[in-house]
Amino acid sequence: MPNGLFWIVKVPDSAVQITEDTLTIHLVDVPTVDAFTFPPPPQDVPGISPFQLIPAKVSFDITYTKTGNPRRIRPASHDPLSPLNWAGQMWNATNSGTFSLAYNDGTFSASGSFDSSGNFGEMGTERNGSFVNHEEEADNDDVEATAQSLSLPLQPTQMSQLAASETAKQPAKVVLLKGRVPVKVTY
Amino acid sequence: MRSRLVYLLFFLLAFSVPLGAQIEPIPNLIVQPIPLPGGDISPPYGLYNQFFPGPPGATPPFDPINADPQGITNFRGVTAMGYTSGMTKDKQYVVITDIRVYQGEYIGGEIADPNPMNSAGATRSAHAHGTFVEI
């Protein structure tokens, strides 16, 4: 990950199909690695990673589906490092899919399915970085007039009341995501 | 029946091999997408160039719901992401994913002067289009 783009690969445009309410992606044999843990443990020797990367390939089909009303996102910060320095129109989204994966050396393989199961997801259109700076005026023109207006909250407690009430209905359990960040699974 | 299965397999392979072959690692791209400058800082790793938006009232472990879900900056287009859970078919493993899809235009960096005598690969801004998947 020398460039800071975690696990990102460029794929053909044809791998993604977008309709008004869904986005479907179909990928076959994407080269990846199994790192076992992330972040990696502290290095024993400077410059030498102590964890092992196993080359593998993964295939999957996933469909994301919009739910509810859109949130209109306006940039709430000019700080380039802020999570709130972007604009767009996002819907909460469910998703489901199937997958298969195998180590290149054939020592491990698995397949199965997954779905959002109440976990958070979203989809929509967005712009960030220089596209936000260049189009800040346009952000104020209600070009996405059908969107439900929702300014970016500065604190989590200032979130949409509608979204908050929907979430409050479900108790949650924290599990690990890829070993890198906690994920809240709702039932 | 068997011939129909082989027929189907032929088409699956014919479709899948070219698609797999067109997957491009980021370092191979002429116009390199630029990572989001911000992100979550988590010791001992440091800065992830990524936010993890979550539902209201779930910070931590998530960032606020309106945190940028993108991994690439200077981007304009469609973004989809979602946290999932599932099982392998043999019920031996729980599968938890965070797969994000980005399709649109971006301003990244390309080598300004390809003549190696003139620079070590110094960049200039360049406009490009792409579909990216974060696995």
Image: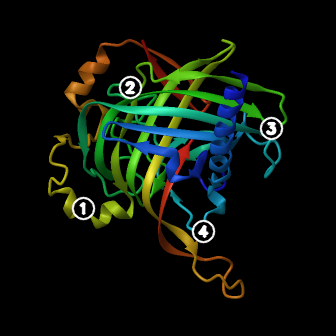
Residue bearing the label numbered 3: A104
Chain letter, disc 2 residue: B
Q: CA distance from mark 1 to mark 4?
A: 29 Å
Label disc, if present, on residue B58 of the rendered structure? 2
Residue bearing the label numbered 4: B30
Q: Residues within 10 Å of mark 4 (few under 14, many from 20)?
A: few
Nearest the viewer among A185 and B103 is B103
Nearest the viewer among A101 and A171 is A101
Which mark is nearer the camera, 2 or 1? 1
**Is label 2 on the same chain as label 1?**
no
**Is label 1 on the same chain as label 4?**
no
Q: Is residue B59 above or below residue A2?
A: above
Q: Residues within 10 Å of mark 1 (few under 14, many from 20)?
A: some
Side (left or right) of A59 relative to A66? right
What amino acid type should be assigned to the residue bearing mark 1? Glu
What amino acid type should be assigned to the residue bearing mark 3? Asn
Q: CA distance from mark 2 to mark 1?
A: 29 Å
Q: CA distance from mark 1 to mark 3?
A: 47 Å
What amino acid type should be assigned to the residue bearing mark 2? Ala
Residue A31 x, y percent position in the rendering: 70, 44
Q: Which residue appears at 81% of the width and 49% of the height? A: A48
Q: Which residue appears at 38% of the width and 53% of the height? A: B77
